[in-house]
Image: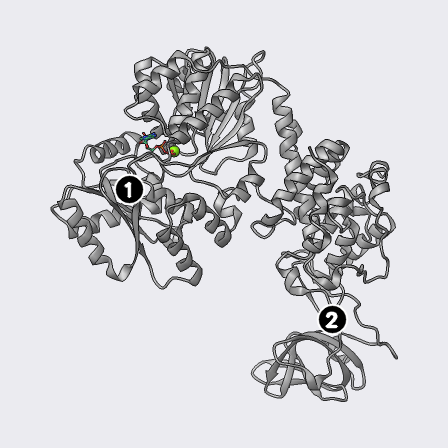
Amino acid sequence: MFSLTVYTIRSPASIFHDDHDKNTVHSCHGSELARPSPANWAQHAATSDPVSGIASIPVRELRGVGPKLAAKLADYGVHRVEDLLFHLPLRYQDRTRITPIASAREGADLVIEGEVRAADIVFGRRRSLVARLQDGSGTLTLRFFHFSAAQKAGLQSGTRLRCFGQVRRGSSGLEMFHPEYRSLEEGEHSVEEALTPIYPTTAGIGQNQWRNLCGQALARLRRDPPADLLPPECHPYDLARALEYLHAPPPDAPQALLREGQHPAQQRLALEELVAHNLSLQNLRQSQQAQGAPALAPGTEQQNAFLASLPFAPTGAQQRVMGEIAADLARPVPMLRLVQGDVGSGKTLVAAGAALQAIANGYQVAIMAPTEILAEQHWSSFSNWFGPMSVAMEWLSGRTRGRRRDAALQRIAGGEAALVIGTHALFQSDVIFDRLGLVIVDEQHRFGVHQRLALTGKGAAGHGKPHQLVMTATPIPRTLSMVAYADLDCSIIDELPPGRQPVTTVLIDNSRRHQVVERVAAACSQGRQAYWVCTLIEESDALQAQAAEATAAELQLALPELAIGLIHGRMKPADKESVMAAFKAGELSLLVATTVIEVGVDVPNASLMIIENPERLGLAQLHQLRGRVGRGREASHCVLLYQGPLSATGRERLLALRDSSDGFYIAEKDLELRGPGEVLGTRQTGLMEFRIAQLPAHSHMLDEVQAIAALIRRRHPELAGPLIQRWTGSKQDFGNV
Ligand code: ADP
Ligand code: MG
């Protein structure tokens, strides 16, 4: 049961890091915004229309915004005045103090003020306009390489200037190159009251323009503050105050904290954004579950026969997770479950158990993999397992074309195909199922929410939504899965099948390549098998294939007596299959491969893996690759053959991999060192694009995010819609999926 006291544990002091900010409201414009007390807040939030005011005013209504600028702003996702306020500065400049020239330090960005003594065009190596500025404490040179006659005329002797720029040491003492400057009125002394924001921008909109627009938006904010959509007990900072602080921080604002995104005002906004994101995924879940699903009776004869036919017993963890799934499937509500497990923990078996439950109940199952080679691997596992049970299987990938595709579509639509395995091709609109009961997505972190939903939309009328099982190829840090998969229940296979040998990993510099080649020769001469993995940063299959071909040729030259095979993504499926079959059968000792073998390949006798240029790959990917060895009884080794010198982070990453075989730990490390986009591989899908929240910087708030979202759903359900609208409105329309 939730109660409001949950939040009193997190007193403001535990959330606020900067003491000086704890009790006072810093407002550069002296307008302290009244914060409604908790007692009247609910009423306030309910009565103020969250989509009125700055949330509904188009930016076009601001001064100076014509159709052209509005179009440019739209490129930044800025359509309404409120969006402008969520466009937060990247950093700040301090223009609140005037520094006497005598105490100006080289390299600093400073405001100085003084009188022009002389301004002349100097013909040196480059023609420049040089002005001497004197302020009583000293003299400094202003230097302009690009200037106009009017500019020179404006710098007459006696003019008082205020300049902002970086101080350097030049030929004539301290200088500023191309400072920003303006002449001062008689008797003018006022300086900036707030730090000056530097906004993220590319060409097209200048800093002054951003400042002007945001200034106007802040003025509107003060007149008509937006509804505070977070219950006040959740965070002591109100929205308007946080926005004002971040666009115009007081001179003594803690800049280091701001740079790290950890200022309470930033946390306040990030918290709200993450809560909104969580609510939108929960909404999605609710709308999915509202539709009902076929109840699939568990413990079917087929499932039992299948388990009995295996040459091994499922691990305890596999049994537990299979139990969780079986129970979900038995309910007339769509299952929404994520299965995580380390490489080799046996996720495929768990998927097979689930698939059989649906098939035995007369429903179809779709299994979707992100790559052709992974789909092929599933095809071969499932044909081995289900072949004896005469389950009708169908294949559908992008390469299935023409008459073969027509026939496949027909068998899928007619219901003859019980199990359909394939790639993205399964999303296509002409793929129609007869009775789709279960969708299994082997994600490898590549599909976004929308893609997943596209498949569940293929449930047939009258049968409800299909159940959904999402499997990840490698573990995802908990913090990330809490955000990216908040709509799913999570099962973890936290146990490897017995008898797995840990893989010993070493780092070797490429200058010792010949030693590695000798080591490969020695291992193969003892009847063992090895992988040599070539990596390239380029996503191009063609370049990768070339690199692998060159390496295979080089190794064959060095080791003429060795049977060496080559596999890469550009080969025809039949050729890939025959190479893999030869390697599996032991006819090839060494397999040179691109990262296509990252997933799915299973040859227990292979006990040595060389990974070239591991510094180019993510840790999760390396861990996945390494998972191809250590599957048999031999002690296995993985050589990370890096190209030195490594950067400090590069070294730290590879050492993390060397020293750990725990995929969950490695994933956390990857997140810390490379950020969520790389780890999830979802930069393309936009899944993790937040306006303000950053991971892992704001990971520590995620438990709180969940609790607040739950609180809102229970106590203030009317706020969920406005929150989702505010933060994800223009971007994602989950309701319409
Ligand atoms: P992943 O979780 O990485 O997808 P797989 O499902 O590919 O792992 O399983 C890896 C290997 O382990 C396969 O060869 C599979 O047959 C085998 N395996 C799965 N479960 C067990 C088990 N309980 N005991 C022994 N081997 C198992
Ligand atoms: Mg797998």
Q: Give the spatial CA distance, label 2 vs label 1.
A: 62 Å
- Secondary structure of the residue carrying tag 2 is loop
CB of mark 2 within 8 Å of CB of mark 1?
no
Q: Nearer the viewer, mark 2 or mark 1?
A: 1
Taking the image as shown, residue 95 lies to the left or right of residue 488, namely right
Dividing the picture into quarters, in which one does residue 417 lie?
top left
Percent across and percent down for residue 495 are 39, 36
Instruction: Examine the rendered structure and indicate whether residue 540 appears above or below residue 490.
Output: below
Q: Which mark is residue 501?
A: 1
Foreground of the two, 118 or 678: 678
Quadrant containing the N terminus in the rendered view? top right
In primary-sequence order, the first of circles 2 and 1 is: 2
What residue is disc 2 on?
95
Inspect this view and state whether residue 504 appears.
Answer: yes
Q: Which mark is residue 684?
A: none
Ligand 2's quadrant is top left
The amino acid type found where label 1 is placed reads Gln
Q: How many marks?
A: 2
The amino acid type found where label 2 is placed reads Arg
Taking the image as shown, residue 332 lies to the left or right of residue 65, namely left
**Mark 2: few, some, or many residues within 10 Å (few <14, many ≥20)?**
many
Taking the image as shown, residue 294 lies to the left or right of residue 692, namely left
